[in-house]
Image (tube, coloured by chain):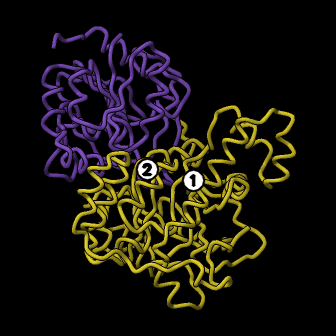
Amino acid sequence: MERQTGTDRVKRGMAEMQKGGVIMDVVNAEQAKIAEEAGAVAVMALERVPSDIRAAGGVARMADPTIVEEVTNAVTIPVMAKCRIGHIVEARVLEAMGVDYIDESEVLTPADEVYHLNKRDYTVPFVCGARDLGEAGRRIGEGASMIRTKGEPGTGNIVEAVRHMRMMQSQIKKVIGMSSDELMTEAKNLGAPYELLLEIQRTGKLPVVNFAAGGVATPADAALMMQLGADGVFVGSGIFKSDNPEKFARSIVEATTHYEDYALIAELSKNLGTAMKGIEIATIEKKDRMQDRGW
Amino acid sequence: MINIGVLALQGAVREHVLALEAHDVNIIIVKKVDQLDQLDGLVFPGGESTTMRRLINKYGFYQPLKDFAAKGKPIFGTCAGAILMAKELVGQVEPHIAVMDMKVERNAFGRQRESFEATLSVKGIGDDVQGVFIRAPIIQEVGEGVEVLAEFNGEIVAAKEGPFLACSYHPELTDDNRMHQYFVNMVRNCIVPA
């Protein structure tokens, strides 16, 4: 019998299966196992978590394939990895290694300041960051099968992820409420494909899963993002930069599932130890803001 | 009206709800154990089986789900849901809820880049069922009481044993809700007095 790989349904469906879950950044097999044990739906294999990338400065690139391989061999849940924006070869290398999802990520230093990857060319699905519906629409237009907020990675400060999620949700609601003759102008104003806006208006939602990312540090942060309409949560530095990664990981997973059960979130938040030390966004110089990478 | 629950600890819950909505049933999104009492049937959605299992243990669902099955109440599992239902898992010592006499291998077709769609012939449904396989498991072996409903290139991908229905693909990701109709009929034919 014939099989078709890399269809939209297979690529987007993979992200649908991650809904209600937490995807955790890990840098080695040991962390990957802790994440899987805690109930992560996937792990993101990295050389350094975003807060360390921020601290180290310089050019951040795709992780050493040895790390990706080590993580892949350690767990049975899906493995994601990041490539630089527009870096065709890093993406192809990760695809060849059998990574389950590629994040074309602003956390790494962009390789191309004009063009993002044509993600339709690949069999492996992609997730991309976005600050608003226009950016999400452009990425979906290029073939992204999953969207996440950009937030401000590596800060442990949820404010930017909240801004981006609220912006996208309000823009989606606006599109749903518009009359059809307003949509082309809205597409022009947003810089989003017209066909995508038609689809949002018809179905009442984005055609791909939309996760929260960039600043989630506590169980309450994860639950907040779910309440604002996120389909699930990425946690980068928040887990393995905390005092007690096992406990933080488990608590964030449970808070994501039961995001409206406040008594439970209170229990989950007790005696967690210190969360990662955060950064006030206003203290980050404009040139160091990762969310402004990409267009 | 009959009550069908969708276990909502993690995974593609919404898609199952949408697929069930067409069949004149009352749908309950199950996050707490006490909701199981009201149900005539239950769906285990696709998602990550390891994540679901951890949350099943954490929130005390393990024994109540086994009891639910022991009462003969129908369960339908897709992909990760089928893994939860298998009595034996390849390479794993302990199964999960273990209600169906079958041996299941996780991620049997490979990684995500090997995920695929194919047209299937499913017994009792039709020969034009679009199977969406995402890091899908296969049913390696089944016991005597298990009816094989579909195969793909010689591998079992859908099976039924009494009130239990499992498939390794995702009917909830297509617009074709005949698999859900089939399950709803199973539930209607099998209302167990409380």
Quarter in which the C terminus of chain B is drawn: top left
- Where's residue A193, x and y in %? 78, 49
Q: Residue B181: name its quadrant.
A: top left
Q: What is the drawing colour of chain A?
A: yellow
Quarter in which the N terminus of chain B is drawn: top left
Mark 1, other Cα within 10 Å: few <14 / some 14–19 / many ≥20: many
Which residue occupies the foreground of this view, A143 or A198? Answer: A198
Spatial CA span between label 2 and label 1: 10 Å
Give the amino acid type for the residue marked by disc 1 in the picture: Met
- Residue beneath the point at 49% across and 22% down: B177
Count of number-bearing discs: 2
Q: Which residue is mark 2?
A: A18
Badge 1 sits on which subunit? A
Which residue occupies the foreground of this view, B152 or B93? Answer: B93
Mark carried by residue A146: 1
Q: Residue A36: name its quadrant.
A: bottom left
- Where's residue B108, x and y in %? 36, 48
- Where's residue A81, x and y in %? 49, 68
- Residue beneath the point at 17% across and 36% down: B98
Mark 2, other Cα within 10 Å: few <14 / some 14–19 / many ≥20: many
Give the amino acid type for the residue marked by disc 2 in the picture: Gln
Q: Are marks 2 and 1 in contact (CB under 8 Å)?
A: yes
Badge 2 sits on which subunit? A
Q: Is residue B35 above or below residue A261?
A: above
Which badge, 2 or 1, comes first in the chain's sequence? Answer: 2
Residue A271 appears in view: yes
Letter of the purple chain: B
